[in-house]
Amino acid sequence: MMVQEDQMQLQGFMRLSEVLKIIPVSKATWWNGCRTGRFPKPYKLSLRVTAWKTSDIKRCIEGFASFSDK
């Protein structure tokens, strides 16, 4: 199931698998981008759960859109 940007809730968190459905890059590229600041920072919700704020992902997508418009 593909999550569309307009269906994203503005609050809450997204797991990596959900993020990569919207931003189609490899896991390695995503983690490198998080480390360098290109992508939003992750949040550790528990010992084995990492997620990203949905609002941060939406802002990231908007940044891509404005970059491609230039």
Image: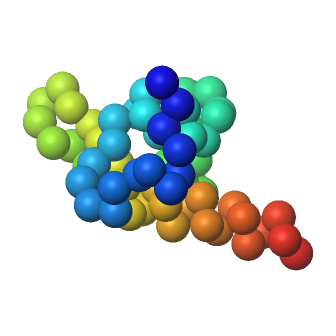
Q: Is residue 64 left or right of residue 18?
A: right
Q: Is residue 61 left or right of residue 56?
A: right
Measured as percent of width and height from the top left, residue 17 is found at: 43, 28
Q: Kindly identify the residue that appears in the image at 84 percent across and 71 percent down.
A: 69
Would residue 41 be seen by someone viewing this image from the given angle?
no
Measured as percent of width and height from the top left, residue 67 is found at: 77, 69
- Choose between 39 and 22: the one closer to the eye: 22
Q: Is residue 54 above or below residue 51?
A: below
Q: Is residue 34 left or right of residue 44?
A: right
Residue 55: quarter of image: bottom left
Measured as percent of width and height from the top left, residue 34 is found at: 49, 49
- Choose between 56 and 31: the one closer to the eye: 56
* Residue at the outermost left position: 46
Q: Kindly identify the residue that appears in the image at 18 percent across and 26 percent down.
A: 48
Q: Is residue 70 above or below residue 59?
A: below
Measured as percent of width and height from the top left, residue 9 is found at: 34, 55
Q: Kindly identify the residue that appears in the image at 69 percent across and 61 percent down.
A: 64
Q: Is residue 70 left or right of residue 37?
A: right
* Residue at the outermost right position: 70
- Choose between 11 and 32: the one closer to the eye: 11
Would residue 16 be seen by someone viewing this image from the given angle?
yes
Applied colour scheme: rainbow
